[in-house]
C-alpha cells in the first residue's frame, strides 16, 4: 500500500511530465489480445471440484481480474541472468508476479498460498532458472518450477522471525541471497533477529550467531550480497563464495572474506546515519550501495567499495537514494534512483560513478494514473542482461520499462496487464442499463467507475487526487444516483483524514462534494434510501468512522442532521473489512445497522422513518469486527448478516428476528446478484464453509425459501486450489446472472462467471 503520507509529493507548478501515446518501445502498454485478458490463474487451471459432497454441487467458472492496472507498491523486480525474459516482481500486499513475455502480461504466483501476499524479499538462483525463493510470513518459500508450486519452511518455528513486507524499508534489499557459486547456500538478513543461513537449498535454516549486529529496527539487515568474484579476480570454485556483504541499518556494511566465519564493519565509507538501502556487485567485485538518512533531512548517497576503499559517487547531494541496478555486461554502467522517486530522480553512469547523467522520462502512463504518478514510492531497478539498454523500474503505481535507457528522453511504457494490487473497501453493482455495472471504493486512489471489466478505467472519481473511498451505495429507484464516503490523509496521515465524500446524480460522471459535513466526519459507511423524496433526492444515512455519530441528509449531502438512537463506533478504522450499515432495497423508510462490541455482544438496530430515529431490535448476535449487513433486492424487509467465524443470519421481518441459514457453517462475507433465468428472487453468493466445504458458493433459490432456507441448493464456484486471495467484499452483478465481484485486500477485484 502507498504509505506513509510523507512519501507523496505533488507536482510542482510549471513542471510537465511528458505523457505520450502510440509508444513504439512496448508493443502494448495494456495489451488487448486474448492473451492479455487471459485467466489470471492461468498457471493454475480451474476445474470442477470433484471432492465436494452431494449436498454441494460444483459449477465451472472463469475467473479474471477486473482490469485496473496498478494501485499498489511493487517493491522489487528481478531478471534471471540466464533467461532474460524471466522477470519477477514482488509487492507489499499483492504477492509475487512472473512476467509472460509472449502474452505481455503478468501471472500471480501466490494465489494458492493464503495470507502470504506481503513479500519481504525475493531471490533467484543465478545458475538455475527454475528456482525461486521468497521471504514472507516468517518463512522462506522455495519453488523449483518458477512459482507454480511452493515449499514453505519457517526460519525459526519455535519463535517466528519478524517480517513486514508492507512496513517501512520494504523497498530495501534484497534481504535474501543465493550463493552464485553454490546454490545450496542461501542467506537471509532479518529486520530484528540477525542473519540466517541455509546450507541445503533452504530445507533447514540456522541463525548465524557470530554475526555482530541485528541493526536498527524496523530495518535491521537491509541487504545481503554475495560476490562471484574476489577483489577483481575470476570466479571462485570453492564450495561457497568467500566474499559476502550485509547492509546494516544504523551502522553500515559488514563484510566477510571467509564465507561468513568472520565479519568486519567496513570503515571509511558512509556514516552510521546513512542507512544502507540496496546494493549491487559488479563482475569485477566492485560493491555499489545506496543510502538513506531521513525524510526530513535527506542526505543519502551512492557509494562504491573497491579494492578495500570507499568512494562517494553520489550524483546529487541532498537526496536519499534506494534503487540501484548494474549492467551485467559492463561493470561501470549503473542506474540509481532517489527515494521518494520523482521525474528528476533517475541517474545513469557509464564510468563507475565518476560522472552522471540525469535521465528524463517520457511515460505512456495508464489513463487513470495521475500526473504526479512519478512522485511516489520507489521500489526496484533491473537491467536486462541480454538487452542492457532495456531497464525496468517499479514504483508505488506499478511497473515501467524502457527499451533504450540511453535515449534522452527515454520512453517508458507501463506493462501492467494482470498485475492488480489494490485494496478494496467497497463494491456496488447498480442495475444500470445503460451504465456501469460496477463501482469500487479502494485505498489510496478513491475508486473507479468500471465501464469495462477488460480495459482499465479512464479516471478515478476525483481525477487523480490521493484518498480513500470506504463506502458506496445507490438508490434503487434511480440507480444513477450514487453516494460515496471517504477521506484524504490529513497532516497526521489517515489518523486525521479530511472528508472527501460526494454525491452523483448521473451514474458517477460528475460528483458533488458534501458540504457542511458533521464535525470530524470522514470515512465509514453510507446507505441510500430505496425510494426518492418529493425533491427527487434519496435519504442518505452516513455512519462515519470512529466517534462521530450517524447523521442523515435529505438534500444530497448539503446539510446533515444527527439521528437519534443509533450507536457510533461501528467502524473504528479504515482497514476493517466490514459493512455495518444498509438500506432496505424496497422500502425507502427502512435502514439497518449492526454494532459489534456491545455488552450483550453484537446488536442490530433499525430505523423505520428514513433514518431519523433508531431502535435496537436484537441483541446477543455473534460479535466480531469483520461483518456485513445487506438487504436483498426486490424483497422488502429481507436483511442478512454475516459475522466472521459464524453462520450466515437471515431476517425476513426487517431485523426483528434472525435465524442462521441452514448448511452455512461459517460465512466471511456474502452478496446478492441478478436472479436466475425464470426466477424472480435474487441469487445469493457466500464465501465461507457450507456443509464442511470451504469456498465461494452460489444459491439460486435460498432467498425464495422461508426461514433458514434448509432446502436451498448450493453450487461451489471456486476450486480447492483457487482460493481467491484474501477476500474482503462480495457483490453480485445486478444485471448479469451468475457474475460475482470479489474485492480483496491486495489482489484487486476478481470477477467470476459461469463458463
Image: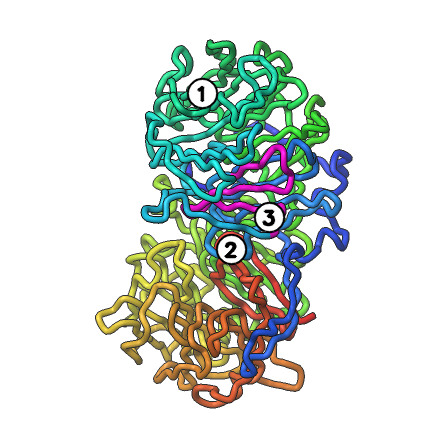
- What label does residue 258 carry, if any? 1
Residue 502 visible at all? no
Q: Nearer the viewer, mark 3 or mark 1?
A: 1
Image location (x, y in percent) of residue 118 = 47, 46
Number of disc labels: 3
Q: Secondary structure at mark 1?
A: loop
For mark 2, what is the residue? 113
Quarter of the figure with the C terminus:
bottom right
Q: Is residue 587 above or below residue 209?
A: below
C-beta proximity under 8 Å, tags 3 and 2: no
Task: Please indicate whether residue 672 sits to the left or right of residue 579 in the image.
Answer: right
Residue at x 76% of width, y 55% of height: 34
295, 286: nearer the viewer: 286
> Magenta residues, as a range?
122-148
**The stretch drawn in magenta includes residue 133:** yes
Q: Residue placed at 54% from the left, 70% from the top?
A: 696
Say which of 46 and 580 sits in front.
Answer: 46
Where residue 713 sits in the image (x, y, percent)?
A: 55, 84
Q: Residue 712 in the image: state x and y as whole percent.
A: 52, 85
> In the image, which is nearer the foreground, mark 1 or mark 2?
1
Residue on which disc 3 sits: 147
Q: Earlier in the sequence, mark 3 or mark 2?
A: 2
| CA distance for labels 3 and 1 | 33 Å
Amino acid at each position: 500500500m502507498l504509505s506513509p503520507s510523507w512519501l507523496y509529493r505533488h507536482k510542482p507548478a510549471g513542471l510537465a511530465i511528458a505523457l505520450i501515446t502510440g509508444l513504439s518501445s512496448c508493443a502494448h502498454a495494456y495489451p488487448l489480445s486474448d492473451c492479455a485478458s487471459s485467466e489470471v490463474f492461468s498457471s493454475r487451471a480451474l476445474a470442477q471440484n470433484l471432492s465436494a459432497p452431494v449436498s454441494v454441487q460444483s459449477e465451472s467458472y472463469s475467473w479474471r481480474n477486473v482490469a485496473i492496472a496498478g494501485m499498489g507498491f511493487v517493491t522489487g523486480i528481478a531478471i534471471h541472468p540466464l533467461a532474460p525474459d524471466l522477470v519477477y516482481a514482488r509487492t507489499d500486499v499483492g504477492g509475487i508476479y512472473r512476467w509472460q513475455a509472449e502474452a505481455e502480461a503478468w501471472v500471480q504466483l501466490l494465489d494458492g498460498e493464503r495470507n502470504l501476499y506481503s513479500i519481504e524479499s525475493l531471490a533467484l538462483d543465478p545458475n538455475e532458472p527454475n528456482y525461486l525463493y521468497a521471504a514472507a510470513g516468517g518463512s522462506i518459500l522455495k519453488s523449483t518450477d518458477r512459482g507454480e508450486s511452493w515449499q514453505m519452511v519457517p526460519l525459526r518455528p519455535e519463535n517466528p522471525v519478524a517480517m513486514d513486507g508492507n512496513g517501512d524499508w520494504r523497498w530495501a534489499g534484497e534481504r535474501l541471497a543465493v550463493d552464485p557459486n553454490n546454490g545450496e547456500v542461501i542467506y537471509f538478513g532479518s529486520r530484528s533477529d540477525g542473519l540466517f543461513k541455509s546450507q541445503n537449498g533452504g530445507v533447514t535454516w540456522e541463525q548465524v550467531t557470530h554475526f555482530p549486529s541485528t541493526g536498527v529496527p524496523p530495518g535491521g539487515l537491509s541487504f545481503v550480497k554475495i560476490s562471484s568474484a574476489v577483489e577483481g579476480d575470476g570466479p571462485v570454485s570453492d564450495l561457497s563464495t568467500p566474499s559476502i556483504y550485509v547492509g546494516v541499518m544504523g551502522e553500515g556494511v559488514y563484510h566477510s572474506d571467509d564465507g561468513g566465519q568472520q565479519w568486519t564493519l567496513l570503515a571509511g565509507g558512509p556514516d552510521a546515519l546513512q542507512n544502507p538501502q540496496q546494493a549491487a556487485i559488479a563482475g569485477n567485485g566492485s560493491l555499489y550501495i545506496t543510502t538513506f538518512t531521513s525524510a526530513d533531512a535527506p542526505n543519502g548517497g551512492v557509494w562504491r567499495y573497491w579494492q578495500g576503499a570507499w568512494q562517494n559517487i553520489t550524483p546529487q547531494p541532498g537526496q536519499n537514494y534506494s534503487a540501484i541496478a548494474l549492467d551485467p555486461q559492463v561493470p561501470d554502467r549503473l542506474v540509481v534512483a532517489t527515494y521518494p522517486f520523482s521525474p528528476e530522480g533517475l541517474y545513469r553512469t557509464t564510468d563507475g560513478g565518476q560522472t552522471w547523467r540525469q535521465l528524463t522520462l517520457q511515460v505512456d502512463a495508464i489513463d487513470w494514473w495521475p500526473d504526479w504518478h512519478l512522485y511516489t514510492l520507489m521500489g526496484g531497478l533491473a537491467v536486462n542482461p541480454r538487452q542492457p539498454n532495456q531497464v525496468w523500474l517499479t514504483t508505488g503505481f506499478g511497473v515501467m520499462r524502457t527499451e533504450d535507457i540511453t535515449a534522452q528522453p527515454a520512453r517508458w511504457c507501463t506493462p501492467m496487464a494482470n498485475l492488480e494490487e489494490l485494496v478494496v473497501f467497497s463494491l456496488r453493482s447498480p442495475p444500470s442499463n445503460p451504465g456501469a455495472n460496477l463501482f469500487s471504493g479502494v485505498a489510496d486512489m478513491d475508486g473507479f467507475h468500471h465501464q469495462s471489466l477488460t480495459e482499465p478505467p479512464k479516471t478515478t472519481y476525483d481525477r487523480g487526487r490521493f484518498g480513500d473511498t470506504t463506502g458506496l451505495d445507490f438508490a434503487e429507484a434511480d440507480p444513477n444516483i450514487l453516494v460515496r464516503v471517504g477521506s484524504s490523509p490529513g497532516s497526521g496521515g489517515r489518523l486525521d483524514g479530511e472528508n472527501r465524500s460526494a454525491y452523483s446524480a448521473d451514474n458517477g460522471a460528475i460528483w458533488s462534494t458534501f458540504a457542511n459535513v458533521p464535525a470530524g466526519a470522514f470515512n465509514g459507511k453510507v446507505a441510500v434510501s430505496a425510494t426518492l423524496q418529493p425533491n427527487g433526492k434519496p435519504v442518505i444515512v452516513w455512519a462515519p468512522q470512529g466517534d462521530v455519530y450517524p447523521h442523515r441528509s435529505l438534500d444530497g449531502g448539503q446539510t446533515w442532521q444527527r439521528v437519534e438512537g443509533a450507536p457510533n463506533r461501528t467502524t473504528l478504522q479504515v482497514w476493517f473489512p466490514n459493512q455495518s450499515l444498509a438500506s432496505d432495497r424496497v422500502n425507502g423508510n427502512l435502514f439497518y445497522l449492526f454494532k459489534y462490541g456491545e455488552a450483550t455482544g453484537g446488536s442490530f438496530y433499525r430505523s423505520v422513518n428514513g433514518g431519523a430515529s433508531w431502535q435496537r431490535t436484537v441483541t446477543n448476535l455473534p460479535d466480531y469486527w469483520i461483518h456485513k449487513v445487506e438487504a436483498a433486492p426486490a424483497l422488502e424487509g429481507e436483511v442478512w448478516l454475516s459475522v466472521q467465524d459464524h453462520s450466515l443470519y437471515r431476517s425476513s421481518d426487517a431485523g426483528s428476528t434472525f435465524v442462521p441459514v441452514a448448511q452455512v457453517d461459517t460465512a466471511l462475507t456474502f452478496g446478492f446478484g441478478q436472479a436466475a433465468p425464470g426466477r424472480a428472487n435474487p441469487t445469493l453468493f457466500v464465501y465461507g464453509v457450507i456443509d464442511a466445504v470451504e469456498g465461494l458458493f452460489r444459491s439460486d433459490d435460498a432467498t425464495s425459501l422461508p426461514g433458514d432456507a434448509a432446502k436451498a441448493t448450493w453450487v461451489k464456484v471456486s476450486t480447492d486450489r483457487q482460493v481467491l486471495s484474501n477476500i474482503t467484499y462480495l457483490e453480485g452483478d445486478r444485471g448479469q446472472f451468475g457474475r460475482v465481484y470479489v474485492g480483496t485486500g491486495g489482489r484487486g477485484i476478481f470477477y467470476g462467471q459461469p463458463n
